[in-house]
Amino acid sequence: RNELLFLESIVNLCSQSKITVLMVTHSPNHAYYFAEKGLPVKVAMLNQGKMIAYGGPYEVLTEENLQKVYRVKVKIGKELDGDNHEINTMTLLKTI
């Protein structure tokens, strides 16, 4: 609940105040969440201190990139949220 309240606060802050937020996170779902709320999201994916990808979350947060950086097999899919909007989901399958 607290994580979602925090994310909702950022969405409201950006939408109402028209400000930019720079956020560092280890949860790729955060970028998907903001993009699905209509915010103009950019992602810089780092590995070993080097940027390996930059762009929108759907271009950067791919199964291949997530596997390379986090060393886990993941499956990215689509689901409908409670309001019938399509959202990205990420399922962790196994470590590699």
Image (cartoon, rainbow, N blue to C red):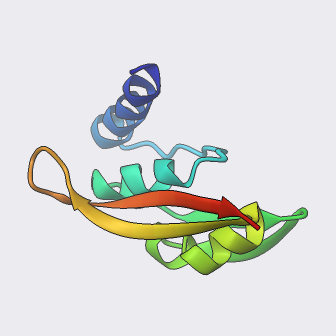
In the displayed structure, 52 sits above or below 87; it is below
Residue lying at the far front of the rendered structure: 94
Name the residue nearer the viewer: 14 or 68: 68
Q: How many marks?
A: 0
Residue lying at the far right of the rendered structure: 48
Residue lying at the far left of the rendered structure: 84
Q: Which residue is found at the position 36% from the left and 58% from the top?
A: 35
Q: Which residue is found at the position 48% from the left and 58% from the top?
A: 91
Quarter of the picture containing the N terminus is: top left
Q: Which residue is found at the position 82% from the left and 66% from the top?
A: 47
Q: Which residue is found at the position 77% from the left and 68% from the top?
A: 96
Name the residue nearer the viewer: 18 or 93: 93
The picture places residue 81, in percent across and down from the top left corner, at 19, 49
Dividing the picture into quarters, in which one does residue 50 lie?
bottom right
Name the residue nearer the viewer: 27 or 11: 27
The picture places residue 39, in percent across and down from the top left corner, at 35, 55
In the displayed structure, 56 sits above or below 3; it is below
Name the residue nearer the viewer: 72 or 13: 72
In the displayed structure, 33 sits above or below 52; it is above
Q: In this view, does 87 lie to the left or right of 61?
A: left
Dividing the picture into quarters, in which one does residue 60 lie?
bottom right
The picture places residue 9, in percent across and down from the top left corner, at 38, 28
The picture places residue 44, in percent across and down from the top left corner, at 66, 65
